[in-house]
Image: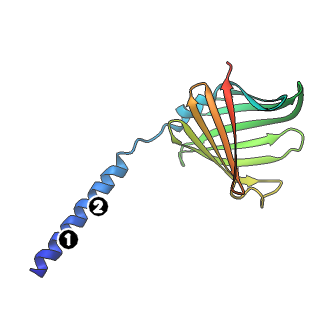
Amino acid sequence: MKKAFITSVIALLLILCSNGMQAQSSQKKLNQVELLKKFIGTWKGELGKDSIGWSEISPFGEISIVGNFKIEVKDKIVYQMKSIFGYDKKSDKIYSVDLEKKSGTMIFYQCEFISDNVLKAVVIKDITNPNVASGKVYYEEFKTPDVLVESVTEHNQKTSITFKRIK
């Protein structure tokens, strides 16, 4: 009786484990390069009264994109940044660097689409202030092909900006 019970438990565990393994292997692998191309275009975000964020993103080779970002307040440019995103085949991740024009600050990110519409970007290094970068996470969510919501969480505070594709 005891032997039959143990055999039944082992059989049940094997069935449960094999079902779990099949479920994990059947998850759809996301094509990071194709999804990255969703960012290509010109985007505009209302940041506040008289403040607009502009982002122009273009392809750079087969597996990368380059972006220029600026903030205008009352038609005057107050901030500029260049971003480069590139796909690393070995890790199946996207890496990016932001370079701020005025300060020269460089921030490095590891990025990955976690669904067809959501890119998660984690700050991996802020060269000018490596201790502050820890814990900063960005989510870029495509609500539609032409509406993108960027959210950043830092020190348990979440801020979101909505960008609309204009080209």
Q: Which secondary structure lies at badge 2? A: helix
Callout 2: few (<14), some (14-19), or many (20+) C-alpha neighbours within 10 Å? few
Question: Which residue occupies the extreme top position in the image?
Answer: 167
Q: Residue at x 90, y 40 (%)?
A: 102
Q: Which residue is disc 1 drawn over?
A: 9
Residue 155, percent from left and from top: 72, 57
Foreground label between 2 and 1? 1
Name the residue carrying label 2.
17
Name the one closer to the observer, 131 or 99.
131
Looking at the rendered structure, the secondary structure element under dot 1 is helix
Which of the 4 image quarters holds residue 112?
Answer: top right
Residue type at mark 1? Val
- Hey, which residue is sitting farthest left in the picture? 1
Give the percent coordinates (x, y) of residue 29.
44, 42
Q: Is residue 94 above or below residue 14?
A: above
Q: Is residue 59 visible?
A: no
The correct choice, above or below, for 56 with respect to 160 in the image is: above
Residue at the bottom extreme, as displayed: 2
What quarter of the picture does the N terminus occupy? bottom left
- The residue depicted at 64 percent of the width and 26 percent of the height is 40
The percent position of residue 86, horizontal first and vertical second, equals: 64, 39
Please state the horizontal and vertical placement of residue 125, each as a whole percent of the image.
73, 54
Sequence order check: which comes first, mark 2 or mark 1?
1
Measured in 3D between alpha carbons, the distance from the residue under mark 2 to the one under mark 1, in whole angstroms, is 12 Å
Q: Which mark is residue 27?
A: none
Mark 2 near mark 1, Cβ–Cβ under 8 Å?
A: no
Mark 1: give few (<14), some (14-19) or many (20+) Cα within 10 Å. few
Instruction: Place residue 82 in its image quadrant.
Output: top right
Q: Which residue is pictured at 68% across the width and 20% down the height?
A: 166
Most foreground residue, 115 or 59: 115
Three-letter residue code for mark 2:
Cys
